[in-house]
Amino acid sequence: MVPHLATALTGPLLDLEKKILDATPAIERWFRLEWQEHTPPFYCSVDLRNAGYKLAPVDTNLFPGGFHHLASEMLPLTVQAAMAAIDKYCPDARNLLLVPEVHTRNPQYLQNVARLMQIFRQTGLHVRLGSLSPDVTEPTPLALPDGNMLVVEPMVRSANGRRLGLADFDPCTILLNNDLSAGIPSVLENVHEQSLLPPLHAGWALRRKSNHLKALDEVAKKFGKLIDIDPWMVNPLHAKVSDVDLEHDQGTEALADAVSSLLSKIKKKYKEYGMKEQKPFVIVKPDAGTYGMGVTTIKDASEVRDLSLKQRAKMSVIKDGLAVTDLVVQEGVPTFENIDDAVAEPVVYMIDRYVVGGFYRVHAERGVDQNLNAPGSQFVPLAFAQQHAVPDLKAKPGTAAPNRFYVYGVVARLGLLAASLEMERTDPNPEVY
């Protein structure tokens, strides 16, 4: 059973919440059947936006880096999910090699790595860290904020070239917590005898958000039919624009046209649902990339043409200095949720097909229509109450925290299912997947 996030937050009544709660048995059966057909990503986090009138996944991360933000009460459930996930790939697993981001001196990120090591050690695995950095030529200690140490080590290929490990460590499974934005390192290619998770095509060297959003369209349609709702209630509208070079004013008109077209579609939806006060906006983001880099809020197509040189430069480069040529224009979903008067959005974490926790990303200096994944954001763990309780079906919609967060778990799993379809369809070696 999906656990229920507990929080003091309340919000407007949601017809969507009532429909999901009423259809809980059908929804859980539908997910079970889908997981018989499709393999969920090894782990995943989904950013949600709750606008009161719709609840939608707005970003799906296949290399989640915030496990240390999850409530400690969730650790037993997380370990159980990790066991189930490992059993699928290597039932007799003994050793796991965890490959972190290269910028491993970031203390926040190191705490995430330490939490992942703790989770997988509690599943009964020996866990060590292998580095993709060419500068790591010997075991290198890294200090954690709490005074403990991690050690990263150089990775080596076996004598036959078919396996990857450390000098004295042969893992069954290699778990990437590095999103490969900088490209696929040669040391990770042609690993034939071990499970490499997530697969290489999940990394930003190959992955594209537009492929994920297409899969989400399909999942949302099926889900909408299942519980009799407009799929738009759980899915942001979107468009893709290719061959853009904003710094040299190439593709600007095509981007402005896409923004204008999408804003018109959103206005039609608002009119359909009698939402006169809500002003439509879109989020323009790179088709590949993470960390919330290059993300801009646009409320009118004219803003695209009037972007300053500084804004253009910011939108043109993402993590690891990579240039942006393809953009996604996504319907902006405002968030009505806040903590201590600061804007908040829920982020739900999953291992295999199980929801294992989440947190609120909170930003005091951002508005309800802005990207919160930015410097200055804070994280408030979502403690899960009544871990194995069923939703409170007698409560009025919008009044019971367990119900609200059961719903969050359902919509986050739509993003998870879309990611599984995306991975299948973009796999360069489908017979191996």
Image (tube, grey):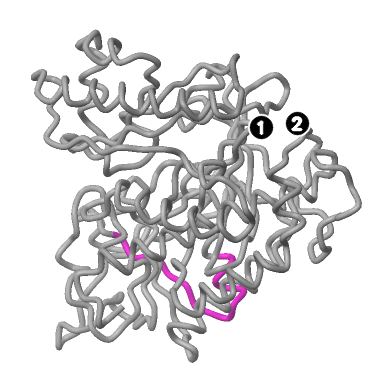
Lower position in the chain sequence, tag 2 or tag 1:
2
Magenta residues? 118-131
Is the Cβ of the residue at disc 2 closer than 8 Å to that at disc 1?
Answer: yes
* Residue on which the image places disc 1: 52
Q: Amino acid at mark 1?
A: Gly
Q: Secondary structure at mark 2?
A: loop
Q: Nearer the viewer, residue 387 or 239?
A: 239
Name the side, left or right, on which 313 lies relative to 331: left
What is the spatial separation of the Cα atoms under label 2 and label 1, in whole angstroms? 7 Å
Q: Is residue 370 above or below residue 162?
A: above
Give the residue drawn at x 66%, y 32%: 52
Residue that extends furthest to the bottom in the rendered view of this protein: 92
Q: Position of residue 361 (x, y in %)?
A: 58, 35
Q: Is residue 389 above or below residue 211?
A: below
Q: Position of residue 33 (x, y in %)?
A: 55, 76
Q: Is residue 282 above or below residue 220?
A: above
User: In the rendered view of the protein, which quadrant contains the C terminus?
Assistant: bottom left
* Residue on which the image places disc 2: 11
Give the residue drawn at x 81%, y 42%: 397
Is 395 contained in the magenta span? no
